[in-house]
Amino acid sequence: MLFLGFSAGLPFLLVFSTLSAWLRGAGIERATIGMLSWVGIVYSIKVFWAPVVDRLQLPLLYRTLGRRRSWMLVAQIGIAIGLFNMSHLNPAQGHLAIVAALALLVAFSSATQDIAVDAWRIEAVPQPMQGVMAAAYQLGYRVALIVAGAGALWIAADHGWRASYLTMTAFACVGIVTTLLIPEPEPRSTGATLLQEQRVVAWLEGKAHWPQFARDLGAWFVGAVVCPFLDFFARYGSGLAILTLAFIGSYRLADFPMGVMTNPFYIDLGFTLKEIAAIAKGFGVVMTIVGAVLGGMAVARLGTVRSLALGSVLIVIANIVFAVFAYLNEPSIPGLAIAISIDNVAMGMAGTALIAFLSGLTSASYTATQYALFSSMYALPGKLLMGTSGFVVDRIGYPWFFCYTATLALPALVLLFFLARKMRQEAR
């Protein structure tokens, strides 16, 4: 799980924050950088092809590796191909469109890998070990962020972006080797699933006059797409389910608009790539790991709901600190370290609490599809907003931009209050 977490975390910054530093250093406008960050929306719409990953058996590979590992391998190869080809391009020399297309390929492959890895994590061990698996995943993911953030920037500063992305391509092989070595989990099914699958039987009985290929396709769609959603709403009820999805969609609303503009902010403030690598992407990710550990302790001691609330409050405080730092407009290393420490501890705590919350919502029978739904919901609204980040900064400046991102964390706190109250009422 540690190595799969590393494989899942490596591509994220390479099509997000690290890519924005490369583009800004190449003279690309902030508005363009903001719009290119929309490739990250792919992570938030993976729910549309999660049923395919959940159910489709890949020819040849399925017999050798099984369902989860075969999809992991195909996705990891796609990531490596995309990064390798990106390393041979220069955005400043007319290659911007091709870089964007390859970033889209990496993002799509990475999102597909996430679907398979999340399903493997939940299916590989029983429920009591899910906390340990989530912690291992978080640690591997954060180490990958150091490599893809600090490591990539440091290599780029000394040897250029081609060497940087070629090195990242080599690190992508960690996931490929891991996938070839780990066991395939045994599929699990529950009585509730069998009842839901009766919908497939009922649908087929009503479509007996259809051609066989149409009946097969329809049966697959009902079983792979319709049943997972009906299962979630059946278990929680429509009111609680809708409120839960609304909370998930708002919880990380502030992170993505802020995140895409941090590297351009550091560069515009006058920090060098090595300073950004050491403080923001090295020390900062270490602080995120500290936050993740504190988040795990908070979940154990305070419970999931209180930990989620604490994470939201800390995110508001972190954005306000960034606003003050931007207002002072001085490239101070200690100031940067303080701002990044607060922000990354907040993100680590919030991330751990959210993973614990989402993992408890899934049914083992529809692991990939339901977890993809939840992880898509938490990221999509923020990623839609992050594409406009460059325009907002150009319009109001960095200090007010960070005040704006601070306010984006407030709706989740309000929804969490109503969600907690609704959950207590349902429990009675």
Image: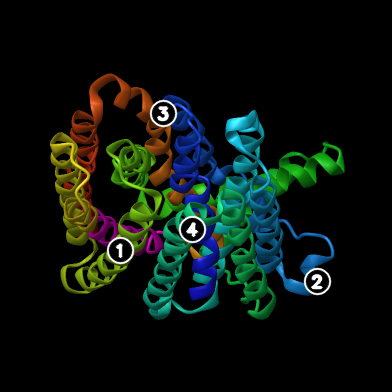
Q: Is residue 385 above or below residue 112?
A: above
The Cα–Cα distance between marks 3 and 1, rounded to whole angstroms, is 25 Å
Mark 2 closeness class: few <14, some 14–19, many ≥20 residues within 10 Å:
few
Q: Where the C terminus falls, by quadrant? A: bottom left
**In this view, 104 is above or below 140:** above
- Which residue is found at the position 46% from the left and 40% from the top? 20
Residue named by callout 2: 63
Please determine whether, in this image, residue 403 is positioned above or below residue 340.
Answer: above
Q: Which residue is mark 1?
A: 283
Name the residue beneath numbered marker 3: 30
Query: Within 10 angstroms of label 4, few (less than 14), some, or many (20 or more) residues?
Result: many
| Inter-mark Cα distance, 2 to 1 | 44 Å
Q: Give the CA separation, mark 2 to mark 3.
A: 47 Å
Secondary structure at badge 4 equals helix
The mark nearer the N terminus, 2 or 1, is 2
Q: Which residue is mark 4?
A: 148
The segment highlighted magenta reads: 343-362
Amino acid bearing label 3: Arg
Report x, y in % for residue 74: 71, 59
